[in-house]
Amino acid sequence: MRLNFKNQKNIFNIHEGSVPYLSFRALDDAGIFINGFTTKDGGVSEGYLASLNLILKKEGEKREHVLENFRRLSEAAGFDMDKAVLSDQTHTTNVRRVTAEDAGKGLLTKPDYESVDGLVTDVPDITLVTFYADCVPLYIADPRKKAIGLSHSGWRGTVGRMGEITLKRMEELYGTDPQDVICCVGPSICRDCFEVGPEVAEAFREGFPEVYHKDIILGPVFNGEGEEKYHIDLWRANEAIFITAGVRKDHIAVTNVCTRCNTDVFWSHRYLGARRGNMAAFLSIKG
């Protein structure tokens, strides 16, 4: 897997093979979690979805292709696809508790929930799955209480502090202490690639303390048409959210892999628009 890294941080294990994926060293080293982030390679999907598309709601996709893609991924990563639970993402900050009775929902059976961008559980062998094509995957793992959270956070979710909301849900349900958790900000669009208008920049100014503005918001700059634009650092923003929520900085791993900078490996909405597949983040507690 040939990647263009934004810095030299050595935070990923790269899993080559028939279904390539990345995993976080910090989560692997904990010894009790299975985690990963997929590429667009290694599956059977066809056409503009070729080849490891992992979401069913795509025009022209076949259910049997997605099931086979999950079968291949689960075999490569070592989790039980029958116990996978999938999100139903609509750019909310809704977080759902997942129990053993939810096994297979969103993949093998129709989910009885809607508009869920975050999932939490303390059930071993249940694999939480969320989907991406530039937005930010947030992994939260509590090795003390043996609980996990996995959330999808685009710019709206980041302004809405999705990472903090997910962590608080784990505190309420499982007694998680922020000082104990390992948090990972996964592969997603980098600051250089994420250009936005002034209304998005203003949302970040309102949503974050002023001390973080210089780190998160770059601009204004003006494009060739004279339009006012800004660049937003979603990686730094989500790191700041975890820090202000009480997570130790040395327990946070922040990606150095941009999905837009690596379009030969990942799908990017900024690059391809809607005609593309989706990568998946996955996280589980070993039984």
Image (cartoon, rainbow, N blue to C red):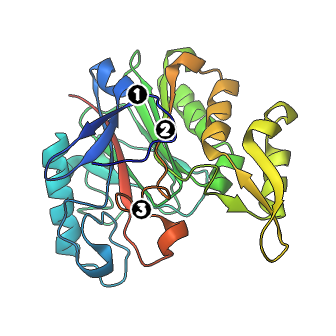
The residue under the point 51% across, 56% down is 116
Is residue 150 placed above or below 203 in the rendered structure? above
Which of the two discs, 2 and 1, sits closer to the camera? Answer: 1
Q: Are marks 3 and 2 in contact (CB under 8 Å)?
A: no
* The quarter of the displayed image where residue 54 is located: bottom left
Q: Earlier in the sequence, mark 3 or mark 1?
A: 1
Q: Which residue is mark 2?
A: 255
Measure the alpha-carbon separation of dots 3 and 1.
21 Å
Position of 12 with respect to 238 (left or right) is left
The residue under the point 33% across, 61% down is 106
Q: Residue 201 location, x and y as percent?
A: 80, 55
Q: Which residue is mark 3?
A: 263
Q: Earlier in the sequence, mark 3 or mark 2?
A: 2
Residue 262 seen in render: yes
The residue under the point 25% across, 63% down is 52
Which of the two discs, 3 and 2, sits closer to the camera? Answer: 3
Q: Residue 245 location, x and y as percent?
A: 66, 26
Q: Earlier in the sequence, mark 2 or mark 1?
A: 1
The residue under the point 38% across, 24% down is 26
Specify the amino acid type for callout 1. Asn
